[in-house]
Image: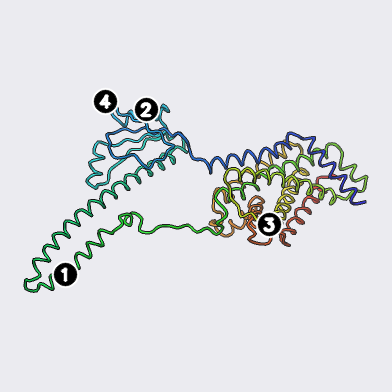
Amino acid sequence: MIIHRIAGLLKKDWKLLMANKSYFILAIILPMLVGAVFVLALHYSPKNVRVGVCGNVTLPLNGMGGDVILIPLNPEGSNCTAVMLENVRSGRVNVGIVFPQDFEEKIKRYKRAKIVLVVDNTKPAMRSLAENLAEKMVEGYAYHLRSSLKENMKQKINLLKSALIILQSVTTSAPYGSLLSHTIELVMERFDDLQNLDLEFFVRPAKVVVLYTNPDLNELGSVFIYTFPVVAFFSISMLAAVGVIFERKNGFFSRMASASIPYPLYLLSKLVIFGVLALIQFLTLLFLFISGGGRYPLNLSSVLPTLEALLIISSLYALIGVIIGNLARESGEAILICLVLALPMTFLTQLFYPVDLLPGKIANFISLMPVNYGGKLLKAGMLSTESVLTWSGLTNIAVMALLAHISYMVSGKK
């Protein structure tokens, strides 16, 4: 009998989702839109960046990459800086680089020179791009200079070594000749060290090698782990809240009471339906991130923990939506509440700030937020770092179910 009632409730919930097709479509399209934005932001570099260059420079402009279009702007008898400012302001070029007249002379004499970078500061993202391009260009100059300096040093040292060899042959028969010869040999050994000196050492005395705790997980893959809970929280809580309000207005709760259907069965049907929806969203978003270059340590041992994480995440988010639906008066109000909750939690995830670095009590509070808690569970499931289906997770679901029941009773939805 209970199975028939649950089946009836599931059928009703599915019809309710289909009745609100715009919300249902949003629940599927939203993960794709959010995923596409993150994939685009992290995976693809800017193409065809127009860089204006002004100044008489014969050194190679290397190191700027193949996606850069260099546009020479060398006006006759005009101020390079003023011309570049106008070109950047008008949008003819995205970034401007001005080389002062003494730039090349200082470089050749091994003195630090200045490069003027012209950026449209009404576009915040363009500044970081411009600085990155300038750093690449300066690194290209530095490499060119180190190579030429090393070659010059070798030639000069060879001349000195030749002179020392001649001096050694002359002083062999002189008083204290053996001592002088030994001293010359020591000096020549030091010259050998100078010849073999890697000038890169003075710029980067140590090479940084990054060792990741999860080598099979790349940056795009880790972004997915914290993107999915954000999308799932808003869509699932919104659909659950709107569904409760729709059922209240259509007198479903009164019919449920007259049919002696206990409220826990109603909540169970919600958890099953939104568990399936969470799985659909998860697979959709996962496919999108993998197509964009996301890499994960996928293996059979992580399938069950991941499903367990999705079950807990969808259950918590659905119950939050039920509570909102019980307390809200209209669908618009419920959607607004879900949005107000989701937006600040999004910026308090590991996507935007290392939460672990916050003060202890604040970090603990933020880590308990539904979105961060969902990210922690999904990380544990996908990476198999720890157990997912624990008494703690089940207790959280039980507490939220109790709160949903209390909100139902308090708001008079019997």
* Of callouts 4 and 3, the N-terminal one: 4
**Does the CB distance between marks 2 and 1 fall below 8 Å?**
no
Nearer mark to the viewer, of 2 and 1: 1
Residue at mark 4: 76
Q: Quadrant of the C terminus?
A: top right
What SS does tag 1 mark?
Answer: helix
- Asked if the residues shown at circle 4 and circle 2 are in contact, with their CB atoms under 8 angstroms apart, the answer is no
* Residue 195 rendering spot, x and y as whole percentages: 25, 58
Q: Which mark is residue 300?
A: 3
- At horizontal 35% and vertical 46% (from top left) the residue drawn is 139
Query: Quadrant of the rendered structure where residue 181 is?
Result: bottom left
User: Three-letter amino acid code at disc 1?
Assistant: Thr
Q: Considering only vertical position in the picture, is 230 above or below 93? A: below
Q: CA distance from mark 4 to mark 3?
A: 68 Å
Residue marked by disc 1: 183
Which of the two discs, 3 and 1, labels the residue nearer the N terminus? 1
Q: CA distance from mark 1 to mark 4?
A: 60 Å
Residue 362: image location, x then y, percent: 58, 56
Q: Amino acid at mark 3?
A: Leu
Q: Disc 4 on helix, strand or loop?
A: loop
Relative vertical location of residue 298 with respect to residue 94 in this rendering, above or below: below
The span from disc 3 to disc 1 (Cα, nearest Å) is 69 Å
Q: How is the image coloured?
A: rainbow
Label 2 sits on residue: 86
x and y, in percent, of residue 196 in the image? 28, 59
Contact (Cβ within 8 Å) of mark 4 with mark 3: no
Dot 3: what SS? helix
